[in-house]
Amino acid sequence: MAQEADAGSDAGSDAQAQEQIVAWVQAYAARTARRSELDAFVTRVDDTIMAAIPEIARDPALVLDLHASTRAQFQIFLSLLERPAQEVLLPPQAVDLALSLARRQLDLGVLLQVYRSASSAVWEYFTEVVRTADTEGLDRTDLLVYLWSHGGAWINGAVEQLIGVFSAEREATLQGAIARRSEVVHAILRGEQVSLTEATTALGHPVRDQHTAVVLWEDGEAAAPDVLTRLSVVVNGLGADLAASVLSIPAGRAEVWAWLTSRQPIGATAVRAAVTELLQGRGEDDGSPAGAAWRIAVGCPGAGVAGLRHSHREAVDAQRHALGVASDARWTAYADVELAALVAGNEAGARRLVERELGGLADPDPSLDRLRETVAAFLAHGASVELAAAELFVHKNTVRYRVARAEELLGHPLSQRRTEVAVALACLERFGTGTGGWFSPRPG
């Protein structure tokens, strides 16, 4: 009888300890659901993943997909954390990331590495949480076992589900003419030796001609299911307006890579005009994408296989610049941001350039925004007061006054070091202002 009483007492103690752990976990989940805590978690996990997988780190759209997936998964994970057994309910953002990896023709190993890296980061994160938190007298080992058993169950379950998603999409993209076209395009973009004849035959596209690459995408974590169809309509509309042949492939959950091809080069100005016409001339009621939140980045024209590849790289660099600027502008042309995009690859050098060339003009004073805007327009138009005034819709004397004020801050006339000042202003737009002329990346 005494043994039975002891066993019952032990069971009761275990149940009470479990209840205390669940109560602590509930409080922890509520605290961690705050935006600041979610941001810290996403940064920690995704930085680990990107350090291990350069294919993701250098692709701006994949980085956005990764952030959305990590955030959404952790939010659902926290909401289910108090349950004794971890239930895996994958959000659509996790599926979107797997689809984007498959559509870029990356190996399954990349998807698996995402979750292996995440597993390591999550283990370290939970270890630090338990080590530093007030555990209210609970055994820290028991808490860590609880958190990690749930975290491990989630990651294993996510991988199991997403392997099926990835494999199905990969198989679909590897079938038929679309698959062959996508394979050849990716081979060209990787720099593999693809002859002009082979590319023309496989793509059914006039590869010998001039190509202007565009990248179209939609922002936001919850893009509509028909987003790729909508973006394809945009591309085909641009092709029709520009009398250009269109080559396009899906590149992610909400992204399309395309080339507008013609005998004569199609410059950024012509594409901009076609985009403007598309937006102004069509309404959402006829099923067109005019009002949707799509954005576009445009490369410079280039001929042949090499031109197709180089123009695309420029369009991707323009997209990266657009995503780094705190702006919702629909349009970014590589020709407009080339110098800033190149300099931005050396952030330390860019910081020094801005501090040296702009001085007080780089201070984070909102009243200086108009001066910087005016100087940029003035330099872009070859130091023409008239053209700058026309672009900014202000009087010529206003331009003269602002230029004179900017020259005071710069310490020299704008007839000197025009290129350096223009590049520094472009870098400032890319990274934002900061105290004392220094600058730091803008959030988002």
Image (spheres, rainbow, N blue to C red):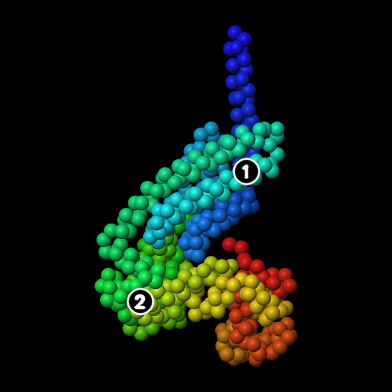
Where the N terminus falls, by quadrant? top right
Residue 344 horizontal/vertical position (percent) = 58, 73
Residue 279 appears anywhere in the view:
no
Residue 133 horizontal/vertical position (percent) = 69, 41
Please give the name of the residue rendered at 45% of the width and 51% of the height, measured from the top-left corner: 112
Q: Residue furthest front?
A: 193
Residue corresponding to mark 1: 127
Give the left or right position of residue 151, taking residue 245 as reference.
Answer: right
Badge 2 element: helix
- Rate crowding at label 1 as few (under 14), some (14 to 19) or many (20 or more) other CA atoms within 10 Å: some
Residue 305 is tagged as 2
Q: CA distance from mark 1 to mark 2?
A: 51 Å
Q: Closer to the camera, 110 or 297?
A: 110
* Disc nearer the start of the sequence (1/2): 1
Mark 1 vs 2: CB contact within 8 A: no
Q: Closer to the camera, 67 or 392?
A: 67
Question: Where 222 sits versus 58, above or below?
Answer: above
Question: Where 232 sits versus 242, above or below?
Answer: above
Give the left or right position of residue 164, taking residue 88 as reference.
Answer: left
Give the left or right position of residue 225, taking residue 4 as reference.
Answer: left
Q: Hey, what amino acid is under mark 1?
A: Thr
Residue 113 horizontal/vertical position (percent) = 47, 52
Badge 1 element: helix
Give the left or right position of residue 405, taking residue 115 as reference.
Answer: right
Q: Hey, what amino acid is under mark 2?
A: Val
Please give the name of the residue rendered at 33% of the width and 81% of the height, measured from the top-left corner: 209
